[in-house]
Image (tube, grey):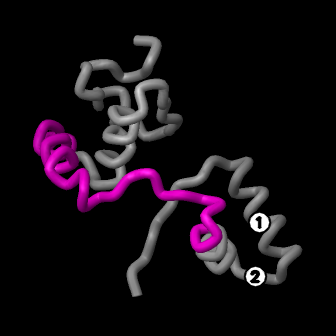
Amino acid sequence: MSTLSLKLPDPLLLRLDQESRQRRMTKSSLVRATLVRGVVRIALEIEDQASDLRMLMQRYRDWPMSLADACLVRLAELHKGGMIFTLNENFRIYRRHDNKMRPDD
């Protein structure tokens, strides 16, 4: 069985915690159920984006960029108005293909 690791914002984690207690489900079971029902959708197919992800990771090989970080940057490239909120300091260095860190740069 493969493992999916998600980084969720605190308000969403709090809501997930509340929902899991109300439904008497584990958080991972609740996340799986929402994925199956289509409530939560993974917006990036790694296989489809593999070459772009490799190029990003190669560009930032001196940092190094994780696959998760590359996926977030790639999502920002694909969704022009998208913003990434993170405490990860490396995102001060990472840039989308149009060389912008954030949409308002």
Q: Which residue is mark 2?
A: 25
Of the pair 40 and 88, the residue shown nearer to us: 40
Q: Which quarter of the figure is the N terminus placed in?
A: bottom left
Location of residue 66 with respect to 20 vertically, above or below: above
Question: For the residue labelled by badge 2, is the local secondary structure a helix, a strand or a loop?
Answer: loop
Q: Label 1 neighbourhood size at 10 Å, few (<14), some (14-19), many (20+)? A: some
Q: Looking at the rendered structure, which numbered label has been put on residue 74?
A: none
Q: Which stretch appears magenta?
A: 35-64
| Residue that label 1 marks | 17
73 shown above or below 48:
above
Between disc 1 and disc 2, the foreground one is: 2
Q: Amino acid at mark 1?
A: Asp
Circle 2 crowding by C-alpha within 10 Å: few under 14, some 14–19, many from 20: some
> In the image, what residue occupies the spot 29% across and 31% down?
94
Q: Residue at x 39, y 43 (%)?
A: 72
Q: Nearer the viewer, residue 48 or 11?
A: 48
Q: In the figure, is residue 54 to the left or right of 43?
A: left
Q: Nearer the viewer, residue 51 or 15?
A: 51
Direction from residue 30 to residue 98 in the image, left or right: left
Residue 35's place in the image compared with 60, above or below, is below
- Marks 1/2: CA distance? 10 Å
Report the side of 60 relative to 9 (left or right): left
Image mark count: 2
Question: What percent of the width, then of the height, locates residue 34?
Answer: 65, 68
Give percent across and percent down for residue 35: 58, 68
Disc 2 marks a residue whose amino acid type is Met
Q: Residue furthest bottom?
A: 1
Q: Is residue 56 magenta?
A: yes
Residue shown at 73%/48% (left/top)?
A: 11
